[in-house]
Amino acid sequence: MKIKVLYDNEALEGFKAGWGLSILVETGKEKVLFDTGADVPTLRFNAEKLGVKKDEIKCCFISHAHGDHTGGLAWIKSAKVFFPGEYDGSLKEFETLVFDYPIKEQALIYLPKKVMFVGCSHPGIVFMSREAYKKFGKLKLVIGGFHLFDIEEDEIEAIAKEMKKLTEGIAPCHCTGSLGKQIFKRIFGKNFIEVKAGSVLTV
Ligand SMILES: [Zn+2]
Ligand SMILES: [Zn+2]
């Protein structure tokens, strides 16, 4: 499977950055979009640069209804969109975990590889990952925004250590913040994956 980061707070050279998140998940069977970033022009620019054709995207999961995740929705008008709690289970390889507090938010899990995608992790990245762990066992990768940009260093370190028990690899981006990224890099070592808009991972 391939993971293409289409929208993030940081970008690789030649790509555009913006506060928001959008990740394209390409499996052998389908192309699924997780979130859409904050605006159409940035999303479209990065997607086209990666050779992504929007007509091939048949469905889109929105982690939660904040503008930095829904702003690019107009780009994929023809796709089926699942807001938290709306997913009908129609894609066999994907499952969602839905959380109600502090805002309705869903994580997307690609079951064959145990990869979890998160938007802003408002319910708490450890809480969300623990729920996934209970259901699916140790995850292979957790990727997305962890919402740690305004959290103290020792607290982030405790979160990173806890996450190490729940997932093998980690790719924090979006609202994780640079301090958060540094700490995860130190705790996860070679299993830390740096991602920005324009990054492509093969899992
Ligand atoms: Zn966000
Ligand atoms: Zn949010």
Image (cartoon, helix red, strand yellow):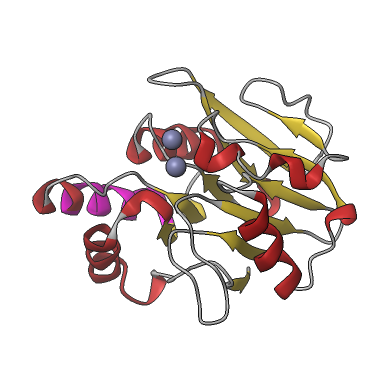
- Farthest front residue in view: 41
Chain part drawn in magenta: 157-167
Residue at horizontal 37%, vertical 49%?
A: 175
Q: Quadrant of the N terminus?
A: bottom right
- Looking at the image, residue 116 sits to the left or right of residue 4; the answer is left
The image quadrant of residue 184 is bottom left
Q: Position of residue 37 (x, y in %)?
A: 57, 48
For residue 98, side relative to residue 47 (left or right): left
Q: Quadrant of residue 53?
A: bottom right
Find the residue positioned furthest to the top.
100
User: How far across and down, in percent of the image, does residue 72 sit?
Assistant: 66, 45
Given residues 41 and 164, the one toward you in this image is 41
Is 165 on the left or on the right of 2, as rendered? left
In the rendered image, residue 117 lying in the magenta stretch gets the answer no
Q: Is residue 160 above or below residue 52?
A: above
How far from the left and from the top, in percent, is residue 188? 31, 67
> As displayed, is residue 95 above or below residue 146?
above
Q: Does residue 159 appear in the picture of this structure?
A: yes
The spot of residue 150 in percent (x, y) is 20, 45
